[in-house]
Amino acid sequence: MRFETGGESTEKSKLERDREAVSKIIQGGDWELSDGMVIGDRSHALGVDLKKQGSEVVDNRDPSARYVPQEGSWNQNGNVLALVGEGGKIFIAPASEARVKQLWESDLEKDGQLGVPMSHGEVPVHPGIRERWDDASVRATRQDQIAREERAAGEREAA
């Protein structure tokens, strides 16, 4: 995107575009910040054998291996999406067809190395967060069900 500023033309950096896309997606609702969220008897984790150290993630099997999640990247595991926001903050939301489509269309990069918290059956310990998560999961499932029903109805009409 180009912007005119006092007769000068400047181009937004990819980082700025990614930050705007992430902000817009998160404001769409049902995204939870996973940092510090206690999940079952494990604290926030970015993968089975990974642990967060500042903005880096260290592989416990090989401490010299470093993985730094890229701001604006995302991943999906099962019915959960993870999205990296500003400063490496990880946001999670229940997956739905609409959310996945929005992520693909946003031009954010899918990162298969990004671990997805809450995607292995973990549940938030805090009752308020757990209730919000459960409600968001029900909404995502219902949205997908409605989308499937609408597609099926359209296919029947076309036939």
Image (cartoon, grey):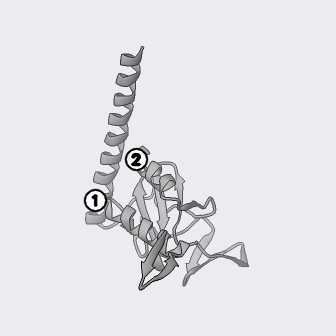
Taking depth in this image into account, of 78 and 11 the one nearest to the observer is 11
Which quadrant, please, contains the C terminus? top left
Q: Residue at x 48, y 53 (%)?
A: 105
Percent coordinates x, y for residue 75 in the rendering: 54, 58
User: Could you tell which of marks 2 and 1 lies nearer the N-terminus?
Assistant: 2
Q: Label 2 sits on what residue type? A: Ala
**Label 1, on which residue?**
132
Q: Residue at x 55, y 68 (%)?
A: 46
Q: Secondary structure at mark 1?
A: helix
Q: Label 1 sits on what residue type? A: Arg
Q: Residue 66, relative to residue 39: is it above or below?
A: below
Taking depth in this image into account, of 53 and 91 the one nearest to the observer is 91
Q: Residue at x 55, y 81 (%)?
A: 55
Percent coordinates x, y for residue 33 in the rendering: 39, 70
Crowdedness of circle 2 by 10 Å Cα count: few (<14), some, many (20+)? few
**Label 2, on which residue?**
98
Q: Residue at x 33, y 42 (%)?
A: 143
